[in-house]
Image (cartoon, rainbow, N blue to C red):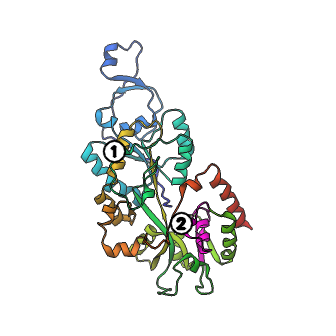
């Protein structure tokens, strides 16, 4: 998964809206002129462009048409958030007049509280798909109206789900130190990763079970087409064989590639976009594409979102092939439409894209992990296994 962090921020207006104290006996004429007495919510503050904490009751002018059709988008920060802003959000605002306000990603507990109180601050949120399955089951996100979202022909059908849309995908696979391990000297498949006699070296896997159980089953010979439902006992038996050879269980996505950079491990389970970023910084790290797992973000609309229509319009805009190609160029996040993929140079596609004709690659199944209580149950089992 892409693990990114960003402080919750909102763009500040160059001039804050005028504020008046509410007075008893306010006239109907003033009320009709657009003066409304209210306590500003976080959402209202975001739409008004006020970043500070506002606690006292006050009166302000009704928002204009542009602020009324802004989209509050809960997503991540860093280079990822900047790329979304530059490639999608700013051109969308210029073309439509609908401003996109980026905030920190949605927390599930906060999302639940806000939807239940009928006051979600977001119009669009980015979740991991298993979270979105849970949110859909709880009624926290609404089904998308795909009649209002312009979607070109998809190269990966998993990108389109009832309650969410993925505008790109990314892959996880085997990363290694290219300076130490030339061709033929590093594992190419997960079965190779388990073969410590043929490919000796220090290894790393994630300290969370999703992805890792699938990796273990691939190593044990389960075909991607027969992966789900996961055979959890079989996965743990396979993990028992590799556990003595794991030098470090990576706790975060950045750490999965940092362990190669710091020479703490030789082979690691990592992410294509993180390998690309490391390579761009001159780090001798490579990424094997022989057997990959395809993962997706989940862009969804909270139930009761104030500007759901504008949110769906934005999601459709993010499916434009030329923009998806720009995101690939910036971060190596893989387009999900055939038209966008055709814009990527062939050499880059061969170097990074999974070849979907081989049958070796696996699209991760959010429905299985998102079943009621499953992730928590398997995570507890996995953590207990790590401690043994």
Rendered location of residue 253, percent (x, y): 52, 65
- The label on residue 231 is none
* Label 1 element class: helix
Q: Residues within 10 Å of mark 2 (few under 14, many from 20)?
A: few
> Which residue lies most toward the left here?
95
Place residue 348 in its image quadrant: bottom left
Measured as percent of width and height from the top left, residue 282 is found at 40, 77
Locate residue 308 relative to residue 207 in the image: left or right: left
Q: Percent x, y for residue 34?
A: 32, 23
Q: Name the residue beneath numbered marker 1.
A: 313
Look at the image and say whether residue 113 sits in the magenta stretch.
Answer: no
Can residue 230 be seen by looking at this rendering?
yes
Q: Quadrant of the C terminus?
A: bottom right
The span from disc 2 to disc 1 (Cα, nearest Å) is: 34 Å
Q: Are marks 2 and 1 in contact (CB under 8 Å)?
A: no
Residue shown at the point (54%, 58%) measured from the top left: 365
First reached walking from the N terminus: tag 2 or tag 1: 2
**Residue range (magenta):** 203-229
Q: Which residue is mark 2?
A: 225
Position of 33 relative to 366 (above/below): above
């Amino acid at each position: 998964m892409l693990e990114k962090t960003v402080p919750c921020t909102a763009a500040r207006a160059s001039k804050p809206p005028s504020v008046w104290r509410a007075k008893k006996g306010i006239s109907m004429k003033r009320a009709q002129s657009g003066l409304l007495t209210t306590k500003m919510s976080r959402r209202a503050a975001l739409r008004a462009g006020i970043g500070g904490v506002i606690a006292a009751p006050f009166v302000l002018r009704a928002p204009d048409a542009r602020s009324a059709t802004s989209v509050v988008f809960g997503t991540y920060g860093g280079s990822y958030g900047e790329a979304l802003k530059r490639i999608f959000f700013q051109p969308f605002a210029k073309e439509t007049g609908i401003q996109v306000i980026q905030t920190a990603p949605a927390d599930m507990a906060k999302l639940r509280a806000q939807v239940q109180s009928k006051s979600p601050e977001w119009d669009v949120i980015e979740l991991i798909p298993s979270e979105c399955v849970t949110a859909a089951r709880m009624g926290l996100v609404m089904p998308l109206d795909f009649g209002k979202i312009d979607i070109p022909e998809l190269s990966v059908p998993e990108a389109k789900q009832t309650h969410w849309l993925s505008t790109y995908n990314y892959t996880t696979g085997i990363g290694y130190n290219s300076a130490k391990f030339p061709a033929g000297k590093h594992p190419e498949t997960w079965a190779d990763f388990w073969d410590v006699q043929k490919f000796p070296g220090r290894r790393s896997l994630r300290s969370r079970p999703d992805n890792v159980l699938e990796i273990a089953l691939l190593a044990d010979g389960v075909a991607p087409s027969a992966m789900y439902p996961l055979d959890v006992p079989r996965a743990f038996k396979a993990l028992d064989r590799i556990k003595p050879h794991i030098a470090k269980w990576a706790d975060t996505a950045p750490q999965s590639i940092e362990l190669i950079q710091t020479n703490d491990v030789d082979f690691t389970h990592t992410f294509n976009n993180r390998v690309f970023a490391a390579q761009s910084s001159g780090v001798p790290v490579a990424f094997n594409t022989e057997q990959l797992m395809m993962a997706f973000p989940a862009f969804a609309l909270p139930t009761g979102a104030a500007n759901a229509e504008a949110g769906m319009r934005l999601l459709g805009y993010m499916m434009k092939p030329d923009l998806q190609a720009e995101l690939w160029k910036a971060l190596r996040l893989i387009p999900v439409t055939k038209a966008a993929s055709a814009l990527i140079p062939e050499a880059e596609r061969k170097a990074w894209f999974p070849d979907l004709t081989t049958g070796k690659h696996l699209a991760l199944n959010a429905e299985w992990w998102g079943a009621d209580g499953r992730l928590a149950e398997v995570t507890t089992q996995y953590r207990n296994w790590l401690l043994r």
